[in-house]
Image (spheres, helix red, strand yellow):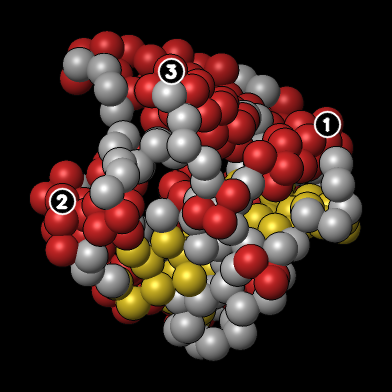
C-alpha cells in the first residue's frame, strides 16, 4: 500500500487504518481506494478488530471531484462496482470494523463509514449526501447500506434537499451508535475495539456473517439460521470456558450504565 495515502499500524490485535490525504480532506481517489483495499486485507490476516479514521480535519469528504473525469456509462458502472468490492471486504469480512468519525463524513465518506460495523462520531462530525446537488447519484453503496441505517425517506431528504446532519442528529437517526465530545472518537473506538478483540471468534462470525443475512430472510428462515448459529457458537471451546467462568462467578456480570457497564 502507499503509506502516503493510507497509514496502517497493528497494536494489541487492533489494526489502525488511517485515510491520509488531509490536504484533500481525505477525498477518495483510485489510489486511496487501492491502499484501503490492501490495508483491509492485511488486517484480515493479523487483527481481531480494526479502526478506520481520518488524518487531518475530517474523516472523509467523499469522491475526489478534482480528479473526477468524464466517463462513459459502462466506465461509471465499473467504477461504482470497484467501490462496492472494496467496501464489501470490510462489511462482509471476518474482522469487526469501527469507524472513528470527525468533521466531514459526506458522500463516499459516509458510504465508507456505513461499511463499518460500529460508528463513533465526535461533536465535530457532520453527515451529508451531496451527490444530488452535483447532478450525480450515489455509487458506493448508499442506496442499500445508508438507506438501511437511516430509512429511505431520510436518505431521500438528504439527497433531494442537501440536508446536513450533525452528530447528535446522526445518533438519533441510528446512523452512528456512539456520540462523544470533540476529539474523543479515537479513544472511544479504541475502547470498543479492545472489547471486540476479546470476543470468541465463533460469536464474532455469527454477528458479522449471520446477523446481516438474517435481516434479508423470511421469519422462519431467519430463526432457523439463528438456531444453527447458536448451536455452532455455544458448542465451541471458548464458549464452554466462558460459561464455566460465569457459573463459577469468575466472569464479568452485566452492570448498568452507571456501574461500569461498558462503553
Judge from the rendering whether residue 79 lies leftward or rightward of residue 195; answer left or right: left
Q: Nearer the viewer, residue 196 or 177?
A: 177
| Residue of label 1 | 45
Q: Which of marks 2 and 1 precedes in the sequence?
A: 1
Q: Are marks 1 and 3 in contact (CB under 8 Å)?
A: no
First in sequence: mark 1 vs mark 3: 1
**Count of labels shown?**
3
Please tell me whether mark 1 sits on a helix, a strand or a loop.
Answer: helix
Mark 1 neighbour class, 10 Å CA radius: few under 14, some 14 to 19, many 20 or more: few
Mark 1 to mark 3: distance in Å?
A: 34 Å
**Which image quarter holds the N terminus?**
top right
Residue located 67% across and 23% down the image? 236
**Looking at the picture, how far across and down is residue 6, in whole percent?**
78, 53
Q: Which residue is mark 2?
A: 156
Looking at this rendering, what residue extends furthest in the bottom direction?
Answer: 182
**Residue at x-position 19% and y-position 19%:** 219
Cα distance between the residues tagged 3 and 2: 25 Å
Q: With 63 as the anchor, is 29 left or right in this view?
A: right
State how far apart marks 1 and 2 are (Cα).
Answer: 38 Å
Name the residue beneath numbered marker 3.
74
Frontmost residue, 106 versus 90:
106
Whether residue 130 is situated above or below residue 48 in the rendered picture:
below
- Picture disc at residue 222: none
Q: Is residue 107 above or below residue 136?
A: below
User: 68 or 34, which lies in front?
Assistant: 68
Amino acid at each position: 500500500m502507499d503509506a502516503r495515502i493510507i497509514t496502517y499500524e497493528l497494536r494489541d490485535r487492533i489494526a489502525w487504518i488511517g485515510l491520509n490525504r488531509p490536504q484533500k480532506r481525505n477525498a477518495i481517489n483510485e489510489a486511496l481506494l487501492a491502499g484501503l483495499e490492501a490495508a483491509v486485507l492485511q488486517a484480515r490476516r493479523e487483527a481481531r478488530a480494526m479502526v478506520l479514521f481520518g488524518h487531518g480535519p475530517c474523516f472523509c469528504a467523499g469522491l475526489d471531484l478534482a480528479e473526477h473525469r468524464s466517463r462513459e456509462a459502462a466506465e461509471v458502472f465499473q467504477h461504482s462496482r470497484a467501490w462496492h468490492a472494496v467496501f464489501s471486504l470490510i462489511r462482509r469480512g471476518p474482522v469487526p470494523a469501527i469507524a472513528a468519525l470527525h468533521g466531514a463524513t459526506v458522500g463516499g465518506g459516509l458510504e465508507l463509514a456505513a461499511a463499518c460495523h460500529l460508528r463513533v462520531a465526535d461533536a465535530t462530525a457532520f453527515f451529508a449526501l451531496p451527490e444530488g446537488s452535483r447532478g450525480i447519484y450515489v455509487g458506493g453503496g448508499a442506496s442499500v447500506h445508508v438507506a438501511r441505517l437511516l430509512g429511505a425517506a431520510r436518505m431521500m431528504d438528504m439527497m433531494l434537499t442537501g440536508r446536513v446532519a450533525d452528530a447528535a442528529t446522526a445518533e438519533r437517526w441510528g446512523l452512528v451508535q456512539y456520540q462523544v465530545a470533540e476529539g474523543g472518537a479515537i479513544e472511544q473506538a479504541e475502547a470498543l475495539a479492545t472489547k471486540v478483540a476479546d470476543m470468541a471468534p465463533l460469536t464474532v462470525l455469527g454477528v458479522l456473517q449471520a446477523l446481516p443475512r438474517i435481516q434479508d430472510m423470511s421469519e422462519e428462515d431467519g430463526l432457523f439460521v439463528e438456531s444453527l448459529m447458536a448451536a455452532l457458537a455455544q458448542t465451541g471451546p471458548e464458549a464452554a470456558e466462558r460459561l464455566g467462568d460465569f457459573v463459577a462467578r469468575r466472569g464479568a456480570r452485566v452492570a448498568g450504565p452507571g456501574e461500569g457497564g461498558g462503553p
